[in-house]
Image (tube, grey):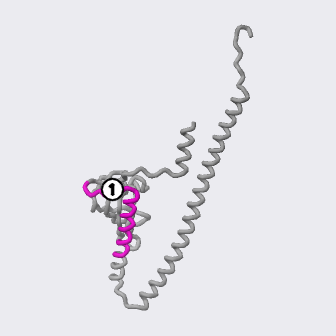
Amino acid sequence: MDGFRQTKEPSLKSKVKELEAALENSSMAVRILQMSVQQMMQSFQGMDRDVGNTMGIANDLQYKTQAMIKMSEFDLEKLETIADELKLVDYTKASDSEDETKGYLVITDRVVADEDIVIITSTTADDDAQGIFRSKFKLSTCGSPELIESLGGATIGTKTDIEINGATHSVELLGIREETLQPEATELEKVLEEVEAQA
């Protein structure tokens, strides 16, 4: 009309295809949301159940242990030493297993980098019970800028005083691990990758 070509209206078939694509994308979005909510619920339920069970067992053992100590004439210092030795054996086994499973490389000949996994222990002057027996974590995600600054560039055996939860801890660096494997993608991440690939 008047020398201009009119734009062709989309066919019914192409409209249906567009509608199907939009519906598929919406369905995928709902699926991702459902999976996210399900994962969160499972995590919270599992944590709540585990914490409840652990607290119950810990309380029971604590009172039974105190009762046994009162009934017997134990050398408390020797008792604590042996208990720490047993804890260390179990911790070492669990830590070595984690190193193997997650592909952590044991580092002994260089300083700590921010992305390294570190193993620390700590004691406090006021109350030994507040000390950290062992803790293993990625330095960059520990949430303590002071700890990151103190241990970044440190070597095994380095000691530093840091305030944690209102108490001054003498922290010692016991080990360094380097991540060599990429973490396996979760089911949710796989679905997100599928959506991106289809976009």
Residue at x 69%, y 29% (from the top left corner): 14
Q: Quadrant of residue 119?
A: bottom left
Residue 172 highlighted magenta (yes or no)? no
Q: Position of residue 27 (x, y in %)?
A: 65, 44
Residue 88 forms part of the magenta stretch:
yes
10 Å neighbourhood of mark 1: few (<14), some, or many (≥20)? some
Helix, strand or loop at mark 1: strand
Specify the quadrant that holds the C terminus: top right
Q: In this view, does 181 lie to the left or right of 38?
A: left
As drawn, which residue projects farthest toward the left?
Answer: 109
Residue 169, given in percent of the width and then of the height, sits at 36, 65
Q: Position of residue 133 (x, y in %)?
A: 38, 69
Is residue 150 visible in the rendered image? The answer is no
In which quadrant of the rendered image does the N terminus lie?
A: top right
Q: Looking at the picture, does residue 115 appear above or below residue 119?
A: above
Rendered residue at 69%/35% (across/down): 19
Q: In the picture provided, is 49 more to the left or to the right than 142?
A: right
Q: What residue range appears in magenta?
A: 85-109
Quarter residue 176 falls in: bottom left
Residue beneath the point at 57% across and 61% down: 44
User: Viewer-proximal residue, 139 or 37?
Assistant: 37
In the rendered image, which residue does mark 1 sit on?
105
In the foreground, 101 or 109: 101
Q: Which amino acid does label 1 sit on?
A: Leu
